[in-house]
Amino acid sequence: MAKVLVLNGPNLNFLGIREPEVYGTTSLAQIEQAILDRGHKLGLDVECFQSNHEGALVDKLQDAYGKVQFILFNPGALTHYSIALRDAIKAVGIPTLEIHLSNIAAREKFRATSVLAPVCIGQISGLGATGYMLGLEAAAGLLPDK
Ligand code: DQA
């Protein structure tokens, strides 16, 4: 069974509380439960992980090497400046899909740039929690050995 890692970065543990007009009222726990349910239906072995710490996310990416076939990654604000995460994604060579709840192209100028996008296979931005579900569909569709 293909392994999919769903990573969430800083402040995403505050979903439901944090700027609900931007990020919605659903908590991360609720989104992760929906991700696990959908992953199960798609025949994927899904693990979810959230951290507010860049280094913990680098460690998780490195741990995934050789074990995980696909990554969905919402790096939060680290999207816009973390060269360490960019290097880690490139280093492990696991297909990684960047996910954002909000449309980062339609907000403050500094959010429009993702330093991770060039090393990701694609990006889903602006679709709320549906973005993670579509990301799982992409994983299921792209992985040969489900
Ligand atoms: C985000 C967008 C980022 O700019 C922001 O810093 C976040 C959340 C999103 O999901 O829309 O923390 O990644």
Image (tube, rainbow, N blue to C red):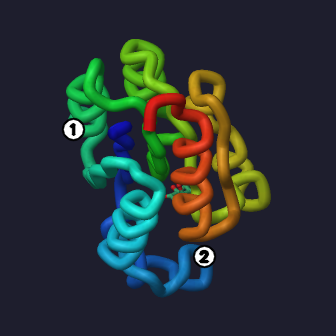
Q: Disc 1 and disc 2: Cα gap in Å?
A: 26 Å
Neighbour class for label 1 at 10 Å: few (<14), some, many (≥20)? Answer: some
Does ligand 1 reach within 8 Å of label 2's beta carbon?
yes
Indicate the quadrant containing the C terminus: top left, top right, bottom left or bottom right.
Answer: top left
In the drawing, does residue 2 fall left or right of residue 136?
left
What amino acid is labelled 1 in the image?
Ala
Q: Looking at the image, is 34 positioned above or below residue 115? A: below
Look at 61% across and 57% down and name the residue there. 134
Q: Mark 1 or mark 2: name the one nearer the start of the chain.
A: 2
Look at 41% across and 72% down and name the residue there. 34
**In-front residue for pair 117/143:** 143
Look at 40% across and 30% down and name the residue there. 69
Q: What percent of the width, then of the height, locates residue 93?
A: 44, 16
Does ligand 1 reach within 8 Å of label 1's beta carbon?
no
In the drawing, does residue 92 fall left or right of residue 110?
left
Q: What percent of the width, then of the height, locates residue 143?
A: 52, 33
Describe the element under mark 2 as helix, strand or loop. helix
What amino acid is labelled 2 in the image?
Val
Q: Are marks 1 and 2 in contact (CB under 8 Å)?
A: no
Look at 71% across and 46% down and name the residue there. 112
Residue 33, numbered circle:
none
Residue at the disc numbered 2 = 22
In the orientation shown, which residue stands out farthest toward the top? 91
Describe the element under mark 1 as helix, strand or loop. helix
Q: Looking at the image, is 32 positioned above or below residue 25? A: above
Residue at the disc numbered 1 = 56
Neighbour class for label 2 at 10 Å: few (<14), some, many (≥20)? Answer: few
Q: Looking at the image, is 86 positioned above or below residue 5? A: above
Q: What percent of the width, then of the height, locates residue 95?
A: 51, 28
Q: Quadrant of residue 14?
A: bottom left
Indicate the quadrant containing the N terminus: top left, top right, bottom left or bottom right.
Answer: top left
